[in-house]
Amino acid sequence: MEQTILATVAPAPVNLLGADKAQLTTFFAGLDEKPFRARQLLQWVHQRGVLDFEEMTDLGKSLRARLSSSAVLRPPQVAEEQLSHDGTIKWSVRVDSGNCIEMVYIPEGARGTLCVSSQVGCALNCSFCATAQQGFNRNLSASEIIGQVWLASQRLAAQPRSQRAITNVVMMGMGEPLLNLDAVVPAMSLMIEDLAWGLSRRRVTLSTSGLVPQLDLLRERCPVSLAVSLHAPYDELRDELVPINKRYPLAELLAACKRYSAVQPKEHVTFEYVMLDGINDSEADARALAKLLRGVPSKINLIPFNPFPESDYRRSPAPRITRFRDLLRQAGYICITRTPRGDDIAAACGQLAGDVQPRSARVAKQRGVLQANA
């Protein structure tokens, strides 16, 4: 009788780069190791930049051997680096064989802000954003998200001006972070973990187009600083610019922002408002925006539109932006005009595109998630 031999397939090593303290504690418990091993690994990886288990000398040899056979610490890889005339750096980061995402570092005095992506592409189809025109492929893993911080830290340390440091992280790169909460929350937990990156919650910001149910979940799970891509003071206009508004209109979104700000009563919600010539930049629009945000602790960032190929929008003239800003200030709001940074290397707000292999089935699945959460 012919015998059939079944091959045993060993499980793929788990990537621990994106595991937060709680997840690492659980992992080490599965190896019959004490909880302090999680602390040791966090410090080696995120504070010392070490990815080789064999270099982690305060771990016993047998534990290092077991880790080497069952786990990896694997960040994504930098495919290209571009330097702007204003010091901004953009990295194209390869996350798999077919896709690259982009992240941006913006130095400004003692402040160094890293703009991190959460998805390969985006399915929300905001009409003024280059990322939306790339389509959507997949969510990034927690390792791929925090891996961007790890990569940028290593690259900056190798720069001639080695004093550069990451003082702030903004989830404002490619993708909608709230559609990838299961990976975004552990990654942000590592950003604010004292044993890892040690940033304060005020220095980690998540930017969203306004997914109300997920916004409430974020408030419960990891309430970092919040930025909302608003861009219009009326539902009719926002429906065109930010299509998710048809699902979660302004009244629902602002109610969620009030609930979120109740967790951090001393913090403002930042509302991002891209200035589009003749679209949303009139004095009437400014007054409507001031009325809309009444009762919400608000800071307003006006963003001069940054053009990208095949876009029909134009940037509002500078005098009109200044008048818009002044009207909001007169109404009692903190309002600043963001200076475009890195626009010569397509690194400015709304210009990130990466190299995305769109998958229509994945876009349909993503949109199905939105409908299910409605």
Image: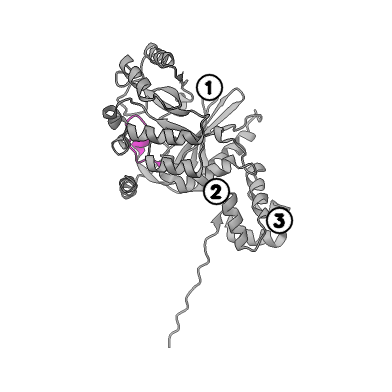
Q: Is residue 315 left or right of residue 181?
A: left
Mark 3 vs 1, N-terminal side: 3
Residue flagged by tag 3: what amino acid is it? Leu
Using the numbered discs, state the Cα–Cα distance from disc 3 to disc 1 in whole angstroms.
44 Å
Q: What numbered label is drawn on residue 59?
A: 3
Q: Residue furthest bottom?
A: 1
Using the numbered discs, state the Cα–Cα distance from disc 2 to disc 3 in whole angstroms.
20 Å
Tell me the element at label 3: loop
Looking at the rendering, the stretch of residues picked out in magenta corresponds to 121-134
Residue 320 x %, y % = 37, 13
Q: Which residue is mark 1?
A: 86
Q: Return the residue nearer the eye: 41 or 13.
A: 41
- Figure disc tally: 3
Residue 1 x %, y % = 43, 88
Q: What numbered label is drawn on residue 18?
A: 2
Q: Quadrant of the C terminus?
A: top left
